[in-house]
Amino acid sequence: MAAAAPPPAAALEQLSKTKMFGGHNLRFRHQSASLGCPMTFSLFLPASPASKLPVLYWLSGLTCTDENFIIKSGAQRAAAAHGVALVAPDTSPRGLNVEGEADSWDFGVGAGFYLNATNEKWKNWRMYDYVVKELPKVLTDNFEQLNTSCASIFGHSMGGHGALTIYLKNTDKYKSVSAFAPIANPINCPWGQKAFSNYLGTTKSEWEAKDDKFLAEQLLAGNFEEACKAAGAPLILRMQPGYDHSFFFIATFIDDHIAHHAQFLKSG
């Protein structure tokens, strides 16, 4: 009996293309099998690589789309200099019309928290599977200039939480991780408690695997620092006095983060 043919590559619809620092910002839409809806992602490709490009995934924070980082961060300059492709997915499914999905800014649409929801109502909120499994395959199938097996991940706020948890669960898939002002201890802060109770249910023991003006009550970076010390995990924690939770903060330090990841992505 003949082996079954492999599934076809996901069809991509190109939405935009703009030149920047010798490379191009591209935006695409495709039908997501993980989420059951059309999804968009943004991609920065440096100019004419002599070899395949490593991939650096960016996960944005609450209320963002795939465009915020590409438009506001200025990351393309450093990415072009280091020869690293940038990939920014959207932050949640959209257009599913689930009751309550747009009732608040910190839950539902634009607030996927990069986890797989287990509550039936939110069954399409499977951003973990989308980021870790589906999106890399979409990139591999459609962009021969990308080396998706050489990847790192970083993000901001909710996306910082996503980057940290995804990396820690998949150290075989990602070379490095960093985060801007991450929600580092979500089960003990209001943002995380709201999201997890709705997406995962009210049994807090089941949350543990998911585990500026917001620093003290929402981000809890100190808790994460102590956990790293207890586990013997290396951590560089930098506090930046006077900066807020916005893209002005991100744009100021984005070059440092990209240089950090480039060291690991280019080390083989």
Image (spheres, rainbow, N blue to C red):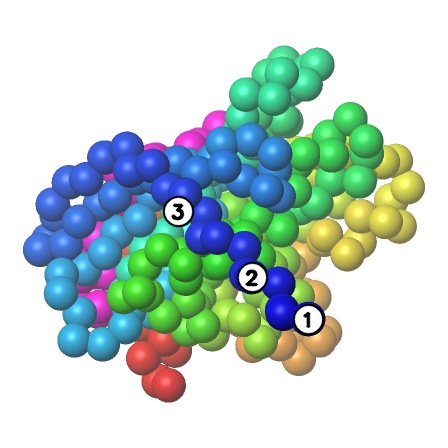
Give the mark toward the camera: 2 or 3.
Answer: 2
Q: Could you tell me residue 196's position as x and y percent?
A: 75, 38
Residue in front for this viewpoint, 91 or 137: 137
Crowdedness near tag 1: few (<14), some (14–19) or many (≥20) residues, C-alpha within 10 Å: few
Residue type, label 2: Ala
- Rounded to the nearest angstrom, the CA distance separating label 1 from label 3 is 42 Å
Residue tagged 3: 88
Q: Could you tell me residue 215's position as x and y percent?
A: 55, 43
Tell which residue pokes out farthest to the bottom in this image.
268
At numbered mark 2, what does the secondary structure look like: helix, strand or loop?
A: loop
Per the rendering, the mark at residue 158 is none
- Point out the tag, 2 or 3, that comes first from the N-terminus: 2
Residue 168 position by quadrant: bottom right
Residue in front for this viewpoint, 203 or 101: 101
- Rounded to the nearest angstrom, the CA distance separating label 2 from label 1 is 12 Å
At numbered mark 1, what does the secondary structure look like: helix, strand or loop?
A: loop
Looking at the figure, which quarter contains the N terminus?
bottom right
- Point out the tag, 1 or 3, that comes first from the N-terminus: 1
Q: Is residue 71 magenta?
A: yes
Per the rendering, the mark at residue 5 is 2
Residue in front for this viewpoint, 135 or 152: 135
Crowdedness near tag 3: few (<14), some (14–19) or many (≥20) residues, C-alpha within 10 Å: many
Q: Could you tell me residue 209's position as x and y percent?
A: 77, 56
Residue tagged 1: 1
Give the mark toward the camera: 2 or 1.
Answer: 1
Residue type, label 1: Met
Q: Is residue 239 above or below residue 260?
A: above
